[in-house]
Image (cartoon, rainbow, N blue to C red):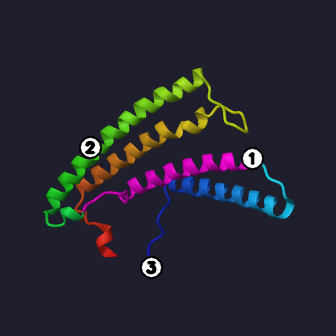
Amino acid sequence: MRSKEKVPLEGKLAILFTVIMISLLTFQIILRYFFGKSFAWVEEVSRYYFVWGVYCYIILAAKNDNHIRITFHLSKLSEKTKKIIISFADVIWLMFNLVVVYVSIKYVMSMFEYPYYSQTLRFNLVYVYMIVPVGFFFLSVRVLQTMIKRLRSNVVIRDQRADM
């Protein structure tokens, strides 16, 4: 039996956003099916919760080192060489993330000056778009934490698909 693991904040947020999204969509289906009515805002808000939830799941995957990567070709290399190659790839990934953070912050800041409003609720979408710099920043933090943990420990790196 597995020990009880503490669910990180991004996991709790991902679950919360998913539950809210599914609840809203279920509410919308019930309204349409039983009452012949619907609210346009429900689908719009559900989409925002979906996007924020996806970013939280991505951050969680990076924290657990379960993000998508190809490692099968490294199976014949020593553990030390694997760590070096994967860490190098993670450094490139971090550089990409930091570029996305920089560019998306500039874009989000421009949305305060030139607002872009949602179609049905008419609120500034800057608060929805903030997930890009926030998400990529925390993704970078988790990737960096995972890299440090991997380099300091004797974790065996293997392609999880090989276990299937």
Quadrant in the picture for the N terminus:
bottom left
Image point (45%, 72%), residue name:
3
For the residues labelled 2 and 1, say whether their Cβ atoms are less than 8 Å apart.
no
Secondary structure type for disc 3: loop
Disc 3 marks which residue? 1
Farthest residue to the bottom: give it: 1
Quadrant in the picture for the C terminus:
bottom left
Percent position of residue 140, x then y: 38, 43
Farthest residue to the front: give it: 36
Q: What stretch of residues is rendered in magenta?
A: 42-71
Disc 2 marks which residue? 91
Of the residues under marks 2 and 1, which one precedes in the sequence?
Answer: 1
Q: Name the amino acid type tagged 2.
A: Val
Secondary structure type for disc 1: helix
Q: Name the amino acid type tagged 3.
A: Met
Residue 89 forms part of the magenta stretch: no
Give the CA distance from mark 1 to mark 3: 46 Å
Q: Is residue 98 left or right of residue 132?
A: left
